[in-house]
Amino acid sequence: MFKVLLLTLCVAFIASEVNAKKFVAYKNPTTALIAMQVCRNFGGHLAAIESDSDHANALAAVTAKGFTFQPNELWSIAGCDSGVEGEWVLLSQNRINTYSKFLPGQPNGVAGDAENCLAYNTSADDPTNTLWDDVSCDAATVGFICEFK
């Protein structure tokens, strides 16, 4: 009986480790497309935010390194809607992201169809509110968040 219990616990632990996401923030001015390549070179990909837990963990990855979120400072994360406007695809996983966490009034596509990448942005009205913004894939960001499994 003890062996069965031990084996069950080991399998459960391994399964949770296999599916665990690890987010790491890098404060390095770049664009979303370059950030995507850098994350891939590090063995990961841009952070795919697919749940409230992912959202909290990605934000924590930034603050864990001593970085702070400032209004209008962008942090690149995974997501692109260049194929179909408003349909956000996780390129690294080749699937549509059904989760979203946009700032009020976003996505707004101010630059027309040119705002096709996702980034965290902090509300100027509420500096404690860091959520998604649709931005140009060529927009300068202060950093990016990679995901590793």
Image (cartoon, rainbow, N blue to C red):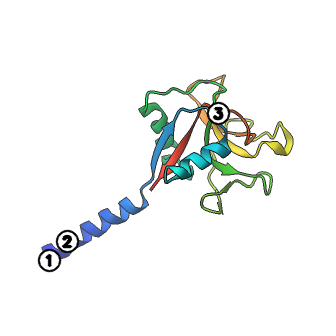
Circle number at residue 64: none
Q: Earlier in the sequence, mark 2 or mark 3?
A: 2
For the C terminus, the quadrant is bottom left
Q: Position of residue 135 (x, y in %)?
A: 73, 39
Residue sitting at x 59%, y 33%: 130
Q: Position of residue 142 (x, y in %)?
A: 60, 30
Q: Mark 3 falls on what kind of element? A: loop
* View extreme (left): residue: 2
For the N terminus, the quadrant is bottom left
Q: Mark 2 falls on what kind of element? A: helix
Q: Amino acid at mark 2?
A: Leu
Q: Amino acid at mark 1?
A: Met
Asked if residue 129 can be seen in this view, the reply is yes
Q: Earlier in the sequence, mark 3 or mark 1?
A: 1
Residue sitting at x 52%, y 46%: 146
* View extreme (front): residue: 41
* Eye-nearest disc, 2 or 3: 3
Few, some or many C-alpha atoms within 10 Å of disc 1 (few <14, some 14-19, many ≥20)?
A: few
Residue sitting at x 36%, y 65%: 15
Q: How far is disc 1 from disc 2 in space, using C-alphas?
A: 6 Å
Q: Are marks 1 and 2 in contact (CB under 8 Å)?
A: yes
Q: Position of residue 86 (x, y in %)?
A: 77, 51
Left or right of 80: which side holds 26?
A: left
Q: Which residue is mark 3?
A: 141
Q: Which residue is mark 2?
A: 5
Q: Which residue is mark 1?
A: 1
68 relative to 19, above or below: above
